[in-house]
Image (tube, helix red, strand yellow):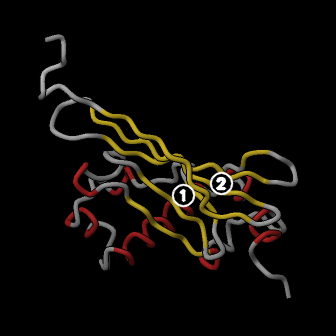
């Protein structure tokens, strides 16, 4: 009768969410999910941070001193270890993560009063079943690699 078969269906959803906003900064998420057949659908989230004074997007390079990558990687791993209650990085493998080497800064973050919130999408550092992996790294743990008087200090860290 011209209708698609009952087993043939798909969907695609997108949503925008404001996660943090003040007079100086806007952090928002774009969530995307779809199902195109197969074992399961897909879900991912992408963050954008905008400096409202300059009207530019903010990247990791705008927040951290040169050569920040290794230290930030270590801080992300340490925060994941706390979240998953393990004592050694390799113990994350027993929680389902692929490899420790996959856990690196990915520029997919949003800023809040507490810290930098990173998300790793499905299959990025862990299997689909673990979903999107979220981790927050407190600003207090990043003081050595934050740009002095940079965006974080101006917007979040109170000077004495």
Gap between marks 2 and 1, in whole Å? 7 Å
Left or right of 7 on screen, residue 72:
right
Tell me if mark 2 has few (under 14), some (14-19) or many (20+) residues whose alpha carbon lies within 10 angstroms of its own: few
Q: The C terminus appears in which quarter of the rendering? A: bottom right
Give the residue at the far bottom of this rendering: 160
Residue 52, label in figure = none
Write down the quadrant of residue 134 in the picture.
Answer: bottom left
Q: Residue 68 location in percent, x, y?
A: 63, 58
Tell me if mark 1 has few (under 14), some (14-19) or many (20+) residues whose alpha carbon lies within 10 angstroms of its own: few
Secondary element at tag 2:
loop
- CB atoms at circles 2 and 1 under 8 Å apart? yes
Secondary element at tag 1:
helix
Write down the quadrant of residue 157 in the picture.
Answer: bottom right
- Residue at 84 percent across and 83 percent down: it is 159
Q: Residue 117 location in percent, x, y?
A: 54, 64
Q: Nearer the viewer, residue 69 or 134?
A: 134
Left or right of 113 on screen, residue 25:
right
Q: The N terminus appears in which quarter of the rendering? A: top left
- Residue at 60 percent across and 62 percent down: it is 19
Q: Nearer the viewer, residue 30 or 69?
A: 30
- Residue at 67 percent across and 49 percent down: it is 59
- Residue at 22 percent across and 60 percent down: it is 96
Residue 70, label in figure = 1
Residue corresponding to mark 2: 67
Residue 109 vertical position relative to residue 8 in the rendered view, above or below: below
């Amino acid at each position: 009768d011209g209708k698609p078969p009952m087993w043939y269906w798909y969907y695609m959803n997108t949503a925008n969410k404001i996660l943090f906003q003040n007079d100086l900064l806007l952090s928002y998420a774009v969530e995307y999910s779809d199902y195109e057949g197969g074992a399961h659908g897909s879900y991912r989230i992408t963050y954008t941070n905008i400096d409202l004074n300059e009207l530019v997007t903010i990247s990791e390079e705008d927040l951290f001193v040169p050569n920040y990558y290794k230290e930030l990687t270590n801080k992300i791993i340490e925060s994941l270890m706390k979240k998953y209650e393990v004592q050694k990085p390799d113990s994350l493998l027993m929680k389902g993560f692929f490899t420790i080497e996959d856990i690196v800064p990915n520029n997919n973050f949003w800023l809040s009063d507490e810290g930098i919130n990173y998300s790793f999408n499905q299959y990025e550092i862990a299997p689909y079943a673990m979903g999107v992996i979220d981790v927050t790294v407190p600003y207090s743990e990043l003081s050595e690699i934050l740009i002095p008087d940079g965006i974080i200090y101006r917007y979040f860290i109170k000077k004495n």
